Image (cartoon, grey):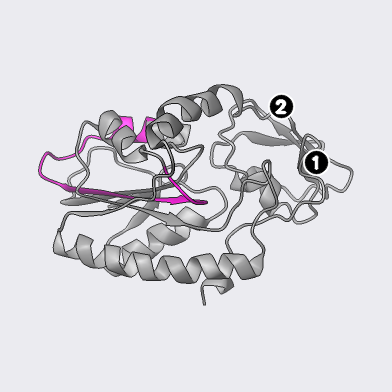
Amino acid sequence: MIYYFTGTGNSEWVAKQLAIGTNDTAVNICKDDVNKEVTDKKVGIVFPIYAWGMPAPVEAFVKSLKLPADCYFYTVCTCGSDCGVVDSQIESVSGKKLNAKMSVAMANNYIQGSNCSDEAEAKRFIQAAKVKLAKFITAVNAGKVYVDMTRGIAPHVLTKAIHPAFLKFASSDKKFYATDACIGCGLCESFCSLGNIKLVDKKPQWQGNCCQCTSCINRCPSEAIQYGKSTEGRIRYYFHEEYAN
């Protein structure tokens, strides 16, 4: 079984590529009816890096999993560039050592920090990811130990100091709002993995349970959703299937 969490679709695509390559099933930990009493011989976790660590919903999910002692346990994390020591975070939370682990760079979706990737850049990331995934899939199918993690400078500081600070100080949804360009389509509500958005008088209202997945702001077809003043005029991104062709 392959469990995944996704905001704008990068990790979903990776999980589904793994599922095809390993003849397995990929399930969304927030959208699907997930059985946490795992009996599978191979278990994968796929998720995006948030400030060099696991998103809060992923950490809670991994903590709740009951994994067989003899299962082959692996992870693939998607990131802009590097991942810190997120693998040690997974092992600590799950109580189980990872047999295979890989980080894979994908298009930037963190619009709060900068412009997101445009179509050309997104396609370059995807083509490079295909090469990395092919090698990883071969290792998983063979049940081999495999490590390919781009950790960054001072990775322990990144994961053990900056990541907790991000969760504490930068995960609020209070700066999100919809401008008059909002058409009331409800896509933000339907795509929110945590059910954190409710339409009130055809305008989104955030409910205080956000993990900064950026789905709402990046998927808005009229670019009506903003985060403070920093996102106005910035390029938005979410995964398009045609990018991978």
- Measuring 77% from the left and 41% from the top, which residue is drawn there? 226
| Extreme residue in the top direction | 168
Magenta range is 60-83
Amino acid type at circle 2 is Lys
Residue 70 rendering spot, x and y as whole percentages: 10, 44
Q: Which badge, 1 or 2, is on the more N-terminal residue?
A: 2
50 lies above or below 167: below
Magenta span includes 74: yes
Please tell me whether residue 112 is drawn above or below residue 187 in the rendered image.
Answer: above
Q: Amino acid at mark 1?
A: Lys
The mark closer to the camera, 1 or 2, is: 2
Q: Is residue 175 visible?
A: yes
> Picture quarter containing residue 143?
bottom left
Q: CA distance from mark 1 to mark 2?
A: 19 Å
The location of residue 1, given as percent across then percent down, is 27, 52
Residue 202: assigned label: 1
- Check residue 174 in the rendering and tell me which mark sits there, or answer none: 2
Residue 241 appears in the rendering: no
